[in-house]
Amino acid sequence: MAHIIQCRICKVKFDTEQEPFVVIGKQSYYHKSCYDEWVKTRNFASTANGDEDFWKESVIDYLYRDVKMSIDFQKINSQWANFTKPEKKMTPKGIYFALRYYYEVAHGDKEKSAGGIGIVSSIYNTAAEYWVNLENKKAGTIDAIVEQIRARQERQVQLIVPKKVEKKKEKFSLDEV
């Protein structure tokens, strides 16, 4: 039975029984080749403070693993694109920290999110103020969190190579007829 999924990098659908793939968490599937190329081009040490892909993956990982929230990828992609428009003045890093503030400090309800990150627009400034105050009280807090995120993204991933199953052909003999 075919299990068709979409690679998170190239967006091409493929059958997991036919191609090797990488799984991160339960819902993040990648072609093996796409994932290898993506990892090769990533320099987590230099991108941790500004790369949009780094922060978007961090948001998804945080919501899935820490908040244990069901994720609507289409909704998050749409909201992310809207929030990161220059006129909105929201940074990818700020979006991540706004969500951390909402779920960890304000104890927001994950059920109300409906799989998205729509709350960010209404809490962004409050969250930014909270993190600035925290950093002023204890310098290095933000850097420590960023380092934890970077270490988490460099974690081991699960490579799955489908087994080739040979179909047995029944042999018929005309002598048996």
Image (cartoon, helix red, strand yellow):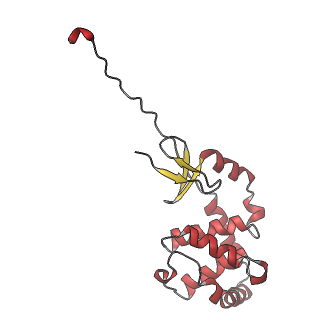
Foreground residue among 171 and 165: 171
User: Which residue: 59% across, 48% down?
Assistant: 31
Q: Judge whether 50 appears above or below 122 on screen.
A: above
93 above or below 2?
below
Residue 32 is situated, as x and y percent measured from the top left of the image, at 60, 46
Residue 42, quarter of the rendered image? bottom right
Left or right, 30 with reference to 134: left
* Image point (69%, 52%), residue name: 38
Mark yes or no: residue 142 visible. Answer: no
State whether residue 144 is above or below residue 106: above
- Horizontal placement of 94 versus 118: left or right? right
**Identity of the residue drawn at 59% across and 84% down:** 119
Q: Quadrant of the N terminus?
A: top left
The residue lying at 55 percent from left, 47 percent from top is 21
- The percent position of residue 153, horizontal first and vertical second, equals 63, 61
Q: Is residue 91 visible?
A: yes
Q: Nearer the viewer, residue 44 or 77?
A: 77
Query: Where is residue 37 shown, x and y percent of the image?
Result: 70, 48
Whether 43 is drawn above or below 83: the answer is above
